[in-house]
Amino acid sequence: QVQLVESGGGLVQPGGSLRLSCAASGSIFSINTMGWYRQTPGKQRELVAFLTSGGRTNYADSVKGRFTISRDNAKNTVYLQMNSLRPEDTAVYYCNLQNGPAREVADYWGQGTQVTVSS
């Protein structure tokens, strides 16, 4: 069983910063991908950023240069440093883990953490 526990959301003013954390526990394979997605009411969940265990990253165009994803493989934890936050970054942020043996990789999700950017 795999469990993801997120923390770090909250209310911040435009231009401010927040750091999200997500710790994975359970049967975690050494080769995996961890990332962050976000969702607002009435819209599909969208990718924010991901980071493979080998160090490859990918960011949504809307967050490039403002957000940084990192991970601690020893702790199975992924972080999302969010700077220069904008009102349009307001969303529920979900941690994602793609984990499993080859050809049996499965998606696991955290419970979501609310990020609100407002003055």
Image: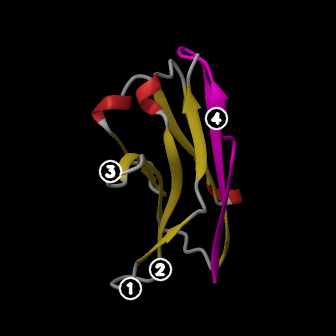
Q: Amino acid at mark 4?
A: Arg
Label 3 sits on residue: 43
Q: Earlier in the sequence, mark 2 or mark 4?
A: 4
User: Mark 1–mark 2 contact, CB under 8 Å?
Assistant: yes
Separation of disc 4 and disc 3 at Cα? 23 Å
Q: Which callout, 2 or 4, points to the residue nearer the camera?
A: 4
Q: Label 3, secondary structure: give it.
A: loop
Q: Where 89 sits versus 113, above or below?
A: above
Q: Judge the density around disc 4: few (<14), some (14-19), many (≥20) Cα neighbours within 10 Å.
A: some
Separation of disc 1 and disc 4 at Cα? 31 Å
Dominant SS type (magenta) = strand
Label 4 sits on residue: 19
Q: Earlier in the sequence, mark 2 or mark 3?
A: 3
Q: Where 118 sits versus 43, above or below?
A: above
Q: Amino acid at mark 2?
A: Gly
Separation of disc 1 and disc 3 at Cα? 28 Å
Q: Amino acid at mark 1?
A: Glu
Residue displayed at 34% across by 51% down: 42
User: Mark 2–mark 4 contact, CB under 8 Å?
Assistant: no
Q: Amino acid at mark 3?
A: Lys
Q: Earlier in the sequence, mark 1 or mark 4?
A: 4
Is 97 one of the magenta-colored residues?
A: no
Q: Label 1, secondary structure: give it.
A: loop
Answer with left or right where residue 23 lies relative to residue 45: right
Q: Where 53 sits versus 30, above or below?
A: above
Q: Which callout, 1 or 4, points to the residue nearer the camera?
A: 4
Residue 100, disc: 2
Q: Judge the density around disc 2: few (<14), some (14-19), many (≥20) Cα neighbours within 10 Å.
A: some
